[in-house]
Image: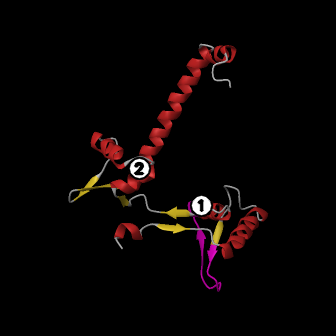
Amino acid sequence: MTAAVLDVETFGPEEDTGAQVIDFLAELRARGMDTPEATARLVSRDGSESVDLPDELFRVLRFVAQNLAEGRAVSVAPLERLMTTQEAAEFLGMSRPSLVKIVDRGDIACTKVGRHRRIRLGDLIDYRTKRAEARRAALDEMARVALENDIYEKTARSGVGIR
């Protein structure tokens, strides 16, 4: 196993713990701890050790528990994790050659390990977020122009797109 593989943990829902996760979430709700102001304490099984959880860690644990309860697997990885171009392309839902063009254009930073490119997970998340924001802005602009020009009404009257 390589170091890159060791820094990612994937947790899948397991049948025998599914009920416990749901009970955990129900208990949080019953205690009013499903609110943003809730605090929590992590206690060892025997009760001999305990530590207050920072708010951010509590939100992460609640998020993981919620997804596991809904039957979804959850992966946890540090933002500094270096990914191959194939892993990065899969993460972004595109082909590796398309990703390489984006990297070569300078839209996503990379480092080289020998002849191979490595891309930080954090940089991929930033790129994906910026791309989603740009897409949303373009769609908002298209909708605004369509409303200004009464395109929706004209399309409905002409019957275009109606089957």
Q: Determine which residue is flagged by label 2.
A: 124
- Magenta highlight on residue 52: yes
Tell me where the magenta segment starts and ends, as one range. 42-57
The answer to whether 107 is drawn above or below residue 160 in the figure is: below
User: Label 2, label 1: how many angstroms apart (C-alpha)?
Assistant: 25 Å
Seen from the viewer's position, the closer of residues 92 and 124 is 92
The residue that appears at 51% across and 63% down in the rendered structure is: 75
The residue that appears at 47% across and 43% down in the rendered structure is: 129
Q: Quadrant of the C terminus?
A: top right
The kind of residue tagged 2 is Leu
Name the residue at the right extreme.
Answer: 30
**Disc 1 element:** helix
Name the residue at the front extreme.
Answer: 163
Res. 120 in view: no
- Magenta highlight on residue 29: no
Circle number at residue 55? 1
The answer to whether 104 is drawn above or below residue 13 in the figure is: above
Q: Position of residue 25 (x, y in %)?
A: 71, 65
